[in-house]
Amino acid sequence: MSAPGADHVLPLREGAVSGPPRGASIIAQIKKANIEYVLSVPDQHTSVGLLYPIAADRDLRLIRVCKEDECFGIAAGLTYGNIRSLILVQYTGFLYAANAIRGVPCEQKLPMCFMIGMLGKEPGVPATQSKKFGLRIIEPILDAMGIQHTSIETEDDVPKISGLIDAAWRESRPQAIILGGRPEAK
Amino acid sequence: MINRREALQFLSRRVTDQIVVATYSSATDWLDIIDRPLNYFSSGAMGLASSHGLGLALARPERRVIVLDGDGSLLMNLGTLVTIAQVAPRNLTHLVFQNGTYEANGGHPIPNQGVDFEAHARAAGMRDTFTVSTLKDFEARSETILAADHLVFGCIKIEQGPLGPRSYKEMYRHERRMALREALAH
């Protein structure tokens, strides 16, 4: 049974049938969802496979912030101006920014989408069963905050991303996209 | 030292189509002085007013955004100065009202009441910065604050205002946010 806030997603498969998510595929989905700005603090999990390609992409505007909670303030201002952004942080940054997430997208019911890099997550193992305490608590915290979340483990999961972002905007609510699989730079 | 209310009353007589982002004590004074759709009251997490302002400035480059920040608030998000200086939106004015106290939280002193915010802003990379401690000097900066064509940072040295509990219920109303969104849609 999936977690209370989890979208209906395919269960994790043994052996990762389609391989890790590709950064280029994720970027294509981001663009398909009309994201203009990416707000981020660097993360080893997404650095090579996703963040460097985003930084090099002329269609996306990357804003490098000093601390993760800034992302949620900037995204709010963009949202009130009807501009879509995507927040890209590591799970530790998500934990750091919890109060900003509580107060901005949750309490203001804003369409705000954030990707959480799960550095160190074991492939094929659900995050809630990880050996790492910090990873195990992410989904329960999202559930406690009432934030819908979906895990991206393999390349097969990537095509969902644009739909998740569109749905968050349609329903004016936050959406977490958990990057369990480490994006590959191809 | 400047009386914050007098400074804001002066500003309110000159503001036109600018978006004004205010927080805590500045927000309560500003709303009491001038209620308008283009007001944005930063809520959710203390310290993020300038981040909200940055997002609005990026979303609506045709309008000037004026952030009315507090010293205690800015200390909670000092990295914002670096982020804003890097992005350097031409339509953003970031004002910090410095009275050396957490006025909205009982008047306790901030750490190091003599902190030099203008020096922080300059070290972060901002070029047009100023500090004023008289109303006359503040008034002399009004053209820059309201209509400059570049990023501006100003530190306004003020007297401590009245302590005591504040009600934020009115300023954080959902309808107020929707009015801002509507105003920005045109």
Image (cartoon, rainbow, N blue to C red):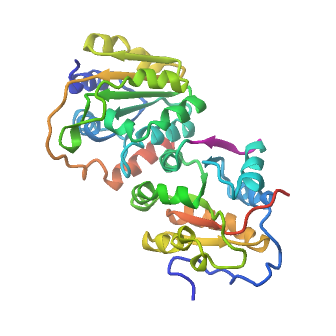
Where is residue B149 shown, x and y percent of the image?
A: 54, 20
Q: Is residue A163 visible?
A: yes
Q: In the orientation shown, which residue stands out farthest toward the front?
A: A131
Residue at x-position 20% and y-position 23%: B3
Q: Nearer the viewer, residue A70 or A59?
A: A70
Which residue is drawn at the image coordinates 60% and 51% (left, top)? A84
Quarter residue B86 falls in: top right
Residue B26: name its quadrant. Answer: top left
Boundaries of the magenta span = A58-65
| Residue A63 in magenta stretch | yes
Between A72 and B27, which is closer to the camera in this rendering?
A: A72
Q: Position of residue A123 (x, y in %)?
A: 72, 74
The residue that appears at 48% across and 55% down in the rendered structure is: A96
- Whether residue A124 sits left or right of residue B72 in the image: it is right
Does the stretch in magenta take in A60? yes
A57 lies left or right of B132: right
Residue A112 visible in the current orientation? no
> Residue B79, percent across and down?
49, 37
Question: Which image quarter is the N terminus of chain B in?
Answer: top left
Picture coordinates of residue B66, whole percent (x, y) = 42, 30
